[in-house]
Image: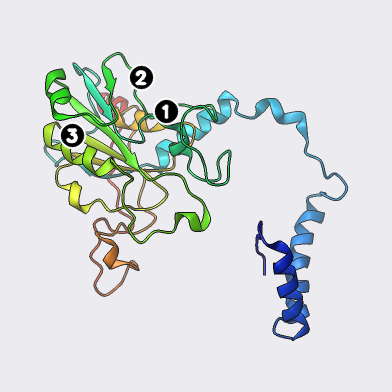
Amino acid sequence: MQVMVPFNFNEFINDVMSLVKSKVIPITRIDDAVSRILLVKFTMGLFENPLADYSFSNELGSQAHRDLAREAVRKSLVLLKNGNNTNPMLPLPRKASKILVAGTHADNLGYQCGGWTITWQGLSGNKNTRGKLLLIKAHKSIFNENPNAGFIKSNNFSYAIIAVGEPPYADTSGDSDKLTMMDPGPAIVTSTCQAIKCVVVVVSGRPLVMEPYVSSIEALVAAWLPGTEGQGITDALFGDHGFSGKLPITWFRNTEQLPMSYGDLHYDPLFAYGSGLVTESVVSIVAW
């Protein structure tokens, strides 16, 4: 009975009262739900002190908080593919002549944050909150969201970092039976990874269809929704910190397989529950 009803709440109240009167919902169930909510509010002292404590407001968004958020990003990343055992792509070499940064999610703070950020359904763009982008702002990197073959060839890039994913959403607005990258993500991955070695970073709140592209991708990272501190992704890509995350959910091959759960008789995912490659930081490698 604990529900959030932002719309049509009057109708909801009337419906519940009708169901209680007709004994479809026992009044004890209502009392149980309400008492547990009130218990939390009484315990927190919200009736005696209903207003927020502003004494810590200056710490909101402080560097210490951002550093902790950046660490959380690094630890939540899941490395799903990394070249092969004898020739891994990650960590990326910093001594590259030129780096291509591409994709719909490489320069969009709103996409990094997802839904329930600033607004209910989230936002697109970089002007609604402060933070650090995944976009590598080094003098050797060039950003082009959707580069064509001529652009790639003429610039002689060492490799490409492509960030793709899905737009922000919340609740039923995110319901989908397709679970694909937003356009032109698939085309960017296909054309760029055919022309140059690439690492693809997937920014999403759930697994997306990747099987058609994974064979052409040199390295694949699930970044989930990193929030405002996107440079935690950069930290791992360049080896300042290693990858250690594991998949908390099965990554399907195609949506026809869904629903799919670990332990199913015909369990054949693209990446199994618990998958995740581990890498050492460059500092650890050098020290060893």
| Rendering colour mode | rainbow
Q: With 149 as the anchor, is 113 left or right in this view?
A: right
The numbered mark, 3 or 1, whose residue comes first in the sequence reads 1
The residue that disc 3 covers is 192
Query: Alpha-carbon neighbours of circle 1 within 10 Å: few (<14), some, or many (≥20)?
Result: many
Q: Which residue is more in the foreground, 285 or 77?
A: 77
Q: In the orientation shown, which residue stands out farthest toward the right?
A: 48
Residue at x 42% of width, y 28% of height: 133
Is residue 163 in sight in this rendering? Answer: yes
* Relative image position of residue 48 (x, y in whole percent): 88, 47
Identify which amino acid the numbered label 3 is placed on.
Thr
Task: State the mark number for residue 133.
Answer: 1
* Relative image position of residue 227 (x, y in whole percent): 48, 37
- The answer for how far apart the CA atoms under marks 2 and 1 are is 9 Å
Does the residue at mark 2 contact the one at mark 1 (Cβ under 8 Å)?
Answer: yes
The residue that disc 2 covers is 137
Identify which amino acid the numbered label 1 is placed on.
Leu
